[in-house]
Image (cartoon, grey):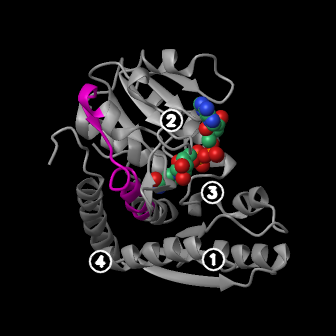
Amino acid sequence: MNAKRIDGVAAATRVLQTVRQDVAELTQSGVQPCLAVVLVGDDPASHVYVRNKVQRAAEVGIRSLEHRLPTDIDARELLSLINTLNADPTVHGILVQMPLPPQIDEASVIQAIRPEKDVDGFHRENVGGLVLGQNVLTPCTPTGCLYLLEQVLGELSGKHAVVIGRSNIVGKPVASLLLQAHCSVTLVHSRSKDAAALCRQADIVIAAVGRPRMVNAEWIKPGAVVIDVGINRIEENGRSRLVGDVDYDAVLPQVSAITPVPGGVGPMTIAFLMRNTVRAARLQNSLPVQPAAIR
Ligand code: NAD
């Protein structure tokens, strides 16, 4: 195996081991962490994601509840379910699987979840808390990216990180987390001028765009660490496969470390969802809450 390849599956296993211990301790003290997952409609990919989350929860001892609702559900019915889950003291985390059908406004659903139960870290109170450097529930994929970087580099302080993409679920929160870790952060997006030149200055590159192999060797400074969040399905040589936003083979000779796709960032998302569920359970029971990132 290539020494530069960051093994996300192994990293997620380590995170889940610590989560399993935390769950066991909490359960012994009378609080079994519980995650409620709400799935609207019959999008096949969403079904797979929910199944994986429920399975992973069971593996670490987290109780899970699945609520499946029909595609044509009225927004009020969904909000009423969220209110019931908000009020239930045995439910610690609420995750509404996105995307939602067009008649439902995703933003209002996210804001309806109690911030202490918002294990996705998307509620504006948690977004604001993250920007202010508070110990809030932070988005799972970005927190997983920080974990991988700290595993590879140790101290991140003083590094120049370039984040490609400025979405609310990846680009912006990962930039906030990097800033909290004392990096100098540049955000590159679709309107940036000469994105490749900006990226070439980076010690750390995080690509979260959704464009297959957009980042090639010309974008990468020798010795940089690359975290590829992109997941893109392409047809190649007559078969369907997943690739990242980074041209892995092209940049490999000059990076010091890189995440593959699949098997890099992907597995971290569920691992940090489980960790957030434990943190949410502690928060709601007035117990000390571990910081978002693990060292
Ligand atoms: P998004 O579409 O919401 O945002 C994409 C961002 O890329 C935008 O901010 C846009 O400004 C930027 N962009 C577009 N074209 C660009 C260009 N030519 N140069 C520079 N920037 C450009 O996407 P997202 O939700 O942030 O997801 C990004 C990718 O990450 C997708 O492939 C998605 O599937 C993947 N993803 C993976 C995980 C995971 O591993 N668990 C989680 C979330 C997202």
Q: Mark 3: which secondary structure?
A: helix
Residue marked by disc 2: 214
Q: Are marks 1 and 4 in contact (CB under 8 Å)?
A: no
Cα distance between the residues tagged 4 and 3: 26 Å
Q: Earlier in the sequence, mark 3 or mark 2?
A: 3
- Kind of residue sitting beneath label 3: Pro
Query: Where is residue 225 drawn, in percent x and y?
Result: 32, 30
Cα distance between the residues tagged 1 and 2: 32 Å
Question: For the magenta stretch, what is the residue range?
Answer: 252-274
Residue marked by disc 4: 28
Q: Mark 2: which secondary structure?
A: loop
Q: Quadrant of residue 226?
A: top left
- Kind of residue sitting beneath label 1: Leu
Nearest the eye: 192 or 85? 192
Q: Using a 10 Å C-alpha cutoff, classify the residue at mark 2 as few (fewer than 14 neighbours), some (14 to 19) or many (20 or more).
A: some
Say which residue appears at 62% left-offset and 29% top-offset: 189
Q: Is mark 2 within 8 Å of ligand 1?
A: yes
Residue marked by disc 1: 39
